[in-house]
Image (cartoon, rainbow, N blue to C red):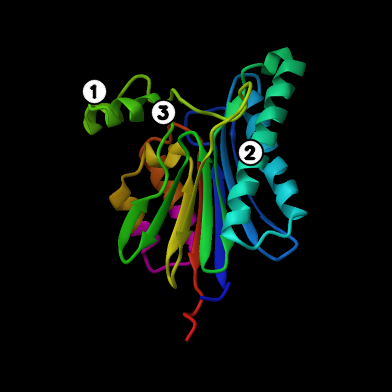
Amino acid sequence: MDKKMEIQFQSDIGKRRNMNQDYANVFTNQAGMYLAILADGMGGHLAGDVASKMAVDGLGAAWSTSTIEQPEEAAKWFSAEIQNVNEAIYQEGIAHPEMQGMGTTIVSTALLDEKFVLAHVGDSRAYLIQNNQLQQLTDDHSLVNELLKSGEITAEMAAIHPQKNVLTRSVGIAGTIQTDISKHQCHQNDYLLLCSDGLTNMVSEENILAIVESDQTLEAKTKQLINAANDAGGADNITVLLIHFEGEARP
């Protein structure tokens, strides 16, 4: 597959929050490779907003000066640079007591021709839409997901659990951060969706799949995903970053 792809992203405050602490952006490195990043910040007094923007802008600035083209290089880069961003956010919290304890999720992908590398911390997700199926590529770093995996609660209980928002991992902690990093293949007409939990807590995977595979522009699909979350109540900020791999298969 050649590098032809389209990327669209949109963020919305939702219906119940008074500020948007989500942040997303796309960057290009010196080799012409794209990095897409989405972050969902947490912390009072604008702190979550600061943390998510620091994460996205920090990773983006580092990617912009890099020459990475290979998945192995990208995986090492993610591990080092997310640690750097983690330290920067932690130190910012120390320097500004009103922001102490702020943090953010990160889900990010380096798009390297027919491969992509994923990195994530927290409960923002990545999904691959391929052959009319939606596959979750990330594993939520959340208390509820740990309880679900251990069999202590059911999926139905998880959906309404009072501690649904409690994360077991986030960016902005003291010490070393553990980032989940994975390498994947992409094919012609696949979609890759990065999203904050403001989408997945409100819209079923069946509905997400139907919207992504609907016959409309990529921009219209991102808007419809946001609208679907708001129509369902819009309980949180909603951010959607959608990538369509359009490239022709090589002979």
Q: Dot 3: within a 10 Å radius of its alpha carbon, few (fewer than 14), some, or many (20 or more) residues? A: many
Task: Tell me which amino acid carries mark 1.
Answer: Glu
> Label 2 belongs to which residue?
82
> Label 1 belongs to which residue?
152
Q: Dot 1: within a 10 Å radius of its alpha carbon, few (fewer than 14), some, or many (20 or more) residues? A: few
Whether residue 130 can be seen here: yes
Whether residue 219 can be seen here: no
Task: Tell me which amino acid carries mark 3.
Answer: Ser
At 24% from the left and 26% from the top, the residue drawn is 157
Mark closer to the chain start, 1 or 2 = 2
Residue 151 location, quadrant: top left
C-alpha gap between disc 3 and disc 2: 19 Å
At 64% from the left and 60% from the top, the residue drawn is 34
Q: Nearer the viewer, mark 3 or mark 2?
A: 2
> Label 3 belongs to which residue?
142
State whether residue 64 is above or below residue 1.
Answer: above
Tell me where the magenta segment starts and ends, as one range: 210-224
